[in-house]
Amino acid sequence: MRVAVPDRPGALAALAGAIGEQGGDIQAVEVVDHAQGEALDDLVVWIDGPERLRALVACVDELDGFRLVHAGPSRGHPGDAVTRVAMGLGALLDTSMTEDHALVTLVGGLLRADSAEMLPAEDAPRADAKTLVLPFADRVLVARRDYRFTET
């Protein structure tokens, strides 16, 4: 689940308590972004069935100052990018993946981009907080997501 959390001491603990009260087991947490008094957190939560999930969603919706952005099936634990890199590099080395496809897959996956594509340099869009443009020779890799990229 992705939750916008008030960026103040104890807020994450309040969210964790609400998840625990509904029978959820937090397996991973990643702070995705923080700005303007709000943190955007991704949590991998194991919950037993759709009824408990509905109760958890309702509980989070009732927390003052919190905003549930998304709740749904996991796309994997934060940090398992190492596995994606290893598989992608293996496919690149055994030539089952082209260089462009490998760059799009690996970099897009590592950056958790909603979309990534390779374009001719002359077709590059303007970079902004949610659009990253990376040069590769005469091409650019354009990665986009619904939350901002950080300087790191």
Image (cartoon, grey):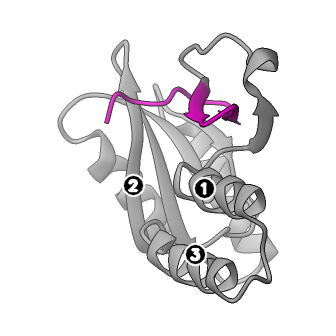
**Residue type at tag 2:** Glu
Q: Are marks 3 and 2 in contact (CB under 8 Å)?
A: no
Q: Nearer the viewer, residue 103 or 82?
A: 103
Q: Which residues are magenta?
A: 132-152
Figure check: 42 above or below 119: below
Distance (Cα) linking label 1 and label 3: 21 Å
What residue is shown at x 60% (from left), y 55% (from top)?
A: 1
Q: Earlier in the sequence, mark 3 or mark 2?
A: 2
The image position of residue 57, as x and y in percent, is 67, 52
Q: Nearer the viewer, residue 99 or 57?
A: 99
Point out the frontmost of discs 3 and 2: 3
Distance (Cα) linking label 3 and label 2: 18 Å
The image position of residue 88, as x and y in percent, is 63, 76
Q: Quadrant of residue 35?
A: top left
Point out the frontmost of discs 1 and 3: 3
**Is disc 3 placed on a helix, strand or loop?**
helix
Mark number displayed over residue 1? 1
